[in-house]
Image (cartoon, rainbow, N blue to C red):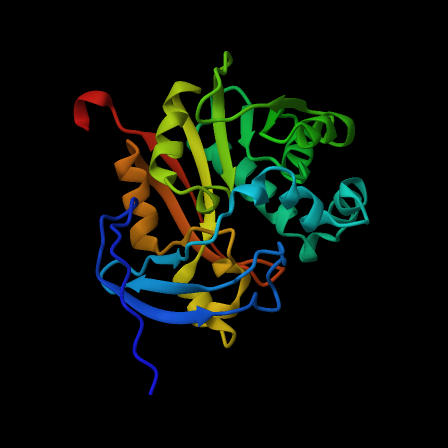
Amino acid sequence: MTAPPIAPDIICPVTGADDWVCIAQFDAPPPVETDFGITPYHRSLWQSCVTGHVVNHHTMDLGAIYQGDYWDRTYGEAGVRAVFDKIMGLPEGRSDNRGRVRFVDATVRRLDPLGTRTALDVGSGLAVFPAALRALGWSVAALDPDPRAARHAEAAAGVAGITADFMTDRLDNRYRLITFNKVLEHVPDPVAMLARTHDVLVPGGLVYVELPDAEGALGDPDGPSREEFAIEHYCAFSATSYTMLARRAGFRVELLERLVEPSGKYTLRGFLRAIAVEAR
């Protein structure tokens, strides 16, 4: 009989939880996961009983993924421009991005009707979101640590491209809207990254945060093998941990909703506004 896995001795940076229960173990990448060529491969998924938050636990070095390999292996030989054009050409009902942009634009106009339409998209990648937002009249900057992504954002999406490390590099401009589209699950300390937003957000502005929905994905027949729990994700969120993330970073949740996107992804998305310093 195989001995049960030993719970990791970690405290969740988002929730402070340490009540982990193992929900899956992998000795090879599941079919939906990009194979980054990491060997040996072993990881396990653990969920907090109290918060529903899920963490990936392993000792594999993910550093190489975000030093060029991620871009190459994710977009393959077809090239980033071909993938960009394909996604931008999807019909309305099949496009996650079109639904996202409609939701963001309409909600900001309701929550912040008098604000200027300036946005910074952090971790812009393919820049399909900045491109579609720009088409609705927004002034958008696309930030990514990979210079190829910044160049692509300018050439293909027609927006300002910024090559920078959001956590350490100085950013001179401030924006009325900061967006994190499936970004914060890729960093070891999402609280710190979200808190950095205060430095570039116009007072009274909004932050849009979109994250993988752990509870929704675990209810799917494929469960832990789904892409919401892929190796490049340090964690996947519950409604509870989404709210705790916002609060720990100095924000309050203005709106939060759960949905299944046209691609089938289980997603939590919402808007945050900074808590007044004296109220924290």
Which residue of the protein is positioned furthest toward the bottom in this rendering? 1
Foreground residue, 278 or 46?
Answer: 46
Q: Is residue 129 visible?
A: yes
Residue 3's spot in the image, x, y percent? 30, 79
- In the displayed structure, 208 sits above or below 90; it is above
Q: Residue at x 28, y 49 (%)?
A: 12
Q: Residue at x 48, y 15 (%)?
A: 170
Which residue of the protein is positioned furthest toward the top in this rendering? 172
Residue 148's spot in the image, x, y percent? 70, 31
Task: State the image quarter where residue 82 is shown.
Answer: top right
Q: Say which quadrant the N terminus sits in.
A: bottom left
Task: State the image quarter where residue 249 is shown.
Answer: top left
119 left or right of 137 in image? left
Foreground residue, 64 or 106?
Answer: 64
- In the displayed structure, 185 sits above or below 108; it is below
Q: Is residue 202 visible?
A: no
- In the displayed structure, 32 sits above or below 114; it is below
Number of numbered labels in the structure image: 0
Which residue of the protein is positioned furthest toward the front in this rendering? 40
Residue 101's spot in the image, x, y percent? 60, 41
Q: Say which quadrant the C terminus sits in.
A: top left
- In the displayed structure, 4 sits above or below 98; it is below
Residue 232's spot in the image, x, y percent? 52, 51
Q: Residue at x 63, y 58 (%)?
A: 35
Q: Residue at x 42, y 44 (%)?
A: 270
